[in-house]
Image: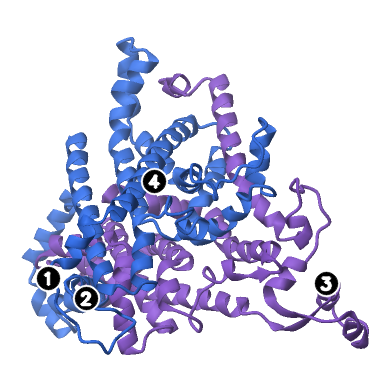
Amino acid sequence: MTDSPINGVAEQVARGTPQPLATRFRGLSDRAIAWIFISPTIVLLLAINIFPLIWTVYLSFTNYRANRPGRPIEWVGTRNYERLLGSEDIWGYLQATAHFVCWTMALQVLLGLGLALLINRNFKGAGFWTTVILIPMMLSPAVVGVFWTYLYQPQTGIFSYILNLFGDFGPIDMIGSVGLAPWSIIIVDTWMWTPYIMLLCLAGLRSIPEYLYEAAEIDRANALQKFWHITLPRVLPFLMLAVLFRGIENFKMFDMVVELTSGGPGSTTELASINLKREAFESWRTGYSSAFAVILFVTVFGLGNIYVKALNRVKQ
Amino acid sequence: MSAKSTAHSVVEASSGGKWLAGGLVVVYALVTMIPLVWIFLTGFKSPPDSISYPPKVFFEPSMEGYVNLFTTRTRQTSEYIESLGPPETWYDEIVRKRNMVIAGPSKFADRYLNSIVIGFGSTFLAVFLGTLAAYGFSRFKVPLKDDLLFFILSTRMMPPIAVAIPIYLMYRTLGLSDTALGMILLYTAVNISLAVWLLKGFIDEIPREYEEAAVVDGYSRLQAFWKVVLPQARTGIAATAIFCLIFAWNEYAFVLLLTSGEAQTAPPYIPLIIGEGGLDWPAVAAGTTLFLLPIVFFTVVLRNQLLRGITFGAVRK
C-alpha cells in the first residue's frame, strides 16, 4: 500500500524539478486534476451510499411508514430499538443467520483448503479443472436459488434421486422439512462459494517460498510437521481474509435464500435480511425496519473489526 | 484428507500423488457440474418429462421450453385450432400440440435487454469514474486519503436491503423508481468502491517515471494520463470491468425492490414463469440457461483476468 522505494525517489525528483511553471501554462494544475478526478466518485457515494445511511438512522427513530407518505412523521425516540431488542423473534432470525454463517464457513474452509492443496500439486490439466470449479461462484445467486428448488424437488428432483442411489432414503424433502431446510441453503451456498475460498488458499500456497520446505527437509521434518509449521501459518492469513469476505456476504445473505426457501418452512430459514425485507416492504414498518437495519449494520461492522484485529495478529 | 494434503514434497509431488490429487479434483469438478448440466438438459425437455419420476436422463429433446419462455399462450378448443388451418411455423406447431395458441411475445426478451443495458451502462460508468478516482488517489496528495479510501471500501459492508429502504424513498421522490437510469446509477455506486480499490492497486504498479518522462517530453498531465497510464492499466481495467459486469448482471435484491416493470432485469422474472399447475420448469431452465451462459462463457474465456482480480483485490485489502 505504501509507495515503493522507486516511487519515493521519483516523487522526490519530481518535487525537485520546477514543474508548476510548466503545468500552469499547459492546462490544469495537478491539484485541480486530482479533485476533478476524485469528486464524481465521492459525490456518487455520498448521494447513494452515505445519505441513505444517515436517512436510515433518522427513520429508525420515527414511526414512518413508506406506504402512507401523507401521514406526519412522529419522533418516537428509542422505542423501535427497545421493541427490537425485546423481541424473541429477532433472536430467532439472528440465530438462523449465525447457524448459516458458521456452517457455510466451516464446510467451505475444509473443502476449499483441501481442494487448494490438491490443485497445488500441479497435475496435468489443473488449470482447466480449476476453471470448471470456479463456474458456480460467478452465477447469479437468485437464479441459482430458483433452479435448486427444481433440483431439490422431493419426488422428481435429481438431488433426492442421486442420494437414493446410495441408500434407501425415500423422497428427501430438503426445502419442505423443518429439519432439512437450514441445510438446504448451506449446501447450495457451499456449492457456490467453496471455489472462492479455494482460490485465496491457492494464492497463499503459491506465495510460500520453496526454500522453506528445503530447509525443513534438511531438518528431517515429516509431512505433518511441514504442514503444521510452514504451510498452515503461511496460508492462514489468506484463508482468514476469504472467511471475512464470505462471512460478511453470508451475514447479509438475501437473494439465494429468498428464492430457494423464502424463509420457510415457518421461519426456519428466515435470515436477518429476509426478515428485514418482510418488515420493510411487506409490512411497511419503515421506522422499525430501519432500526433493524442499523442494528445489523453495527453488528457486521463490529464483528468485522474484531475479526480484522485477530487477522492482523495472525499476520505478524 | 489431512494425510493426503500434508504430503508437500520439496521438489514436485510424486507421480502417484499427482494422479490421486488430479483424480479427486476432477471428481469434485464433475459433481459440482451436475446441477448446471441438469438445468441445461431440462431446458430441452417437454413439461411432462421435466417432472417425471424417476428423473429422466435420456429423453426426446423438445424446444417447448424455449418457445414457452419467449411467448405467452392461450388455451383454445381443438375445433378453434383446427379452423386456423395448418401451423405456419415450427413453434406454432409445438404450441398447438398442447391445444394452445401463441398470443404474443413474453416479457423475457425485454428483461434480458434491460439486463444488458443496465449491466453494461453501470459497468462503463463505474470503470470510467473508478479509473479517474484511482488515478487521483494513486498519484496525487489528497487530504485525508486513507480515510477516504477506507470510507469508500466500508460502503460495501451494508446489507443491500438496509440501503434499499431510503433509496426506495429517494427514488420515489426523484422519479427514478423503475427507470434504467436509476438502476445504472445505483449499480455504479455499489461497484465503484471495488473498482477504485482494484484500479488503485493496478495503477500503483505502473512506475511513475513513465509519466514523468512524458511530461518532460512536453505532455500535459492529462495527456500523460491518457497516452501513458491508460494503455498500461489496460488489463487491470479489463479485470475490474468483468467484476462490475458480473455484479450488475447477477444483482437481485435492489432490482426486486426498486423496479416493477419497465426497468426490471431478468433475475426476478425467471421464477415467475408459470406453466400449468406450477412453474413451467423447462421454460425456467431455458431462461436460466440463456441467462447464465454469457457468464460461463466469460469465466472460461477471461479466467486469467478473473483470477488476477479475485486474488489481487482480496490480498490487497
User: Mark 4 against mark 1, which lies toward the viewer?
Assistant: 1
Which residue is found at the position 46% from the left and 72% from the top? Answer: B119
Looking at the image, do the residues carrying marks 3 and 2 touch, with CB atoms under 8 Å apart? no
Query: Chain A rendered in what hue?
Result: blue
* The disc label shown at residue B98, or none: 3
Element class at badge 1 = loop
Residue B38 or residue A224, whichever sits in front: B38
Residue B104 seen in the figure? yes
* Residue B286 vertical position relative to residue A89 in the rendered view, above or below: below
* The disc label shown at residue A100, or none: 4
Amino acid type at mark 1: Gly
Amino acid type at mark 2: Asn
10 Å neighbourhood of mark 3: few (<14), some, or many (≥20)? few
Q: For mark 3, name the chain.
A: B
Amino acid type at mark 4: Phe
Q: CA distance from mark 3 to mark 2?
A: 53 Å
Looking at the image, do the residues carrying marks 1 and 3 touch, with CB atoms under 8 Å apart? no
Q: CA distance from mark 2 to mark 4?
A: 31 Å
Looking at the image, do the residues carrying marks 4 and 1 touch, with CB atoms under 8 Å apart? no
